[in-house]
Each structure stands twice: as structure tokens, then as C-alpha cells.
Image (cartoon, helix red, strand yellow):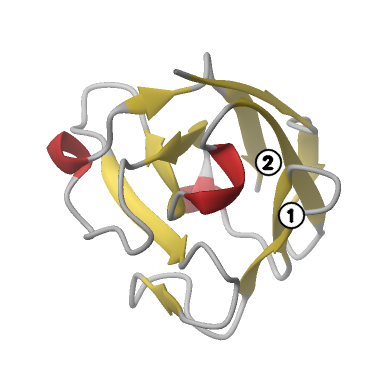
Amino acid sequence: QVQLVESGGDLVQTGGSLRLSCAASGRTSSASGMGWFRQAPGKEREFVARITWIGVGTSYADSVKGRFTISRDNAKNTLSLQMNTLKPEDTAVYYCAACRTGVCTTTARDYAYWGQGTQVTVSS
């Protein structure tokens, strides 16, 4: 089992920055690929970014590429998402997720473990 707890969500103005964190615990947390997803009201949960268990391989949704950076610190069992140049369309609940293997896909159903989510609101 892997337990995930997100933090860092807030209200920010357009163009601002936020850093989300996810604290992971459990026997396999450091060996799991991880990712960030988001869900806006009335919309499906969508992929944002993912990172391999060793932290070398990353990929991003086109909508956030060049603005968001995913990283992890396995020594501290933490996952982060640095979000810059935020836009109103980035407003959503952001979820941290982990899969059972070292490399995850971009599909939400392939992730076995989820945090409770943290709200990010970008005002125009």
C-alpha cells in the first residue's frame, strides 16, 4: 500500500506560481512511478505530468509543457509540481498518484494509489 497526501494548493493570480507537494509513505513508494492529474468542475480527470521511479524520465501534457515541472526526492519520499505562469484554465483539484510499476502511463485508470487532492484556483 502507498499513502499519498498533497499540499500547496491556493488561490493565485494569473501569471503567478505555486508549488504542490505530495508526501508518500508505504513499502513501495520510492519504487513507484508517480504522476499529477487534475480535475476541473464538470470535466474528467486529466493527466498533467508523470515521472519515473528513479526520477530521470518525465513527460507533460501539452497544456502545461514549459510551465510546469515535476520532480521527486526519494530520500524524503516527496513528489513536487512547480507551476509557473499559471492561467485561469489551470484551475482544478490537483491529485498526486502512484502506479505499481516504476514507469507509469498517462492514463488515470493505470494508477493504483491516489491522494485526496488539493485545490488550485487561478483568478483572472
Residue toward you, 56 or 11 = 56
Q: Alpha-carbon distance for marks 1 and 2?
A: 33 Å
In the displayed image of the protein, which residue is found farthest to the front? 27
Q: Residue at x 58, y 59 (%)?
A: 87
Residue toward you, 19 or 50 = 50
Toward which corner of the image does residue 10 lie, by quadrant?
Answer: top right
Q: Residue at x 22, y 22 (%)?
A: 42
Q: Percent x, y for residue 22?
A: 69, 36
Q: Residue at x 51, y 36 (%)?
A: 28
Residue with the mark numbered 2: 123
Q: Residue at x 64, y 34 (%)?
A: 120
Instruction: Classify residue 109 as left or right of residue 119.
Output: left
Dot 1: element: loop
Q: Is residue 113 above or below residue 94?
A: above
Q: Amino acid at mark 2?
A: Ser
Question: Sequence order check: which comes first, mark 1 or mark 2?
Answer: 1
Residue with the mark numbered 1: 74
Q: Amino acid at mark 1?
A: Asn
Q: Percent x, y for residue 32?
A: 45, 49
Which quadrant: the N terminus?
A: top left
Count residues near mark 2 (Cα–Cα under 10 Å), then give few for <14, some for 14-19, many for 20+: some
Q: Is residue 110 above or below residue 47?
A: above
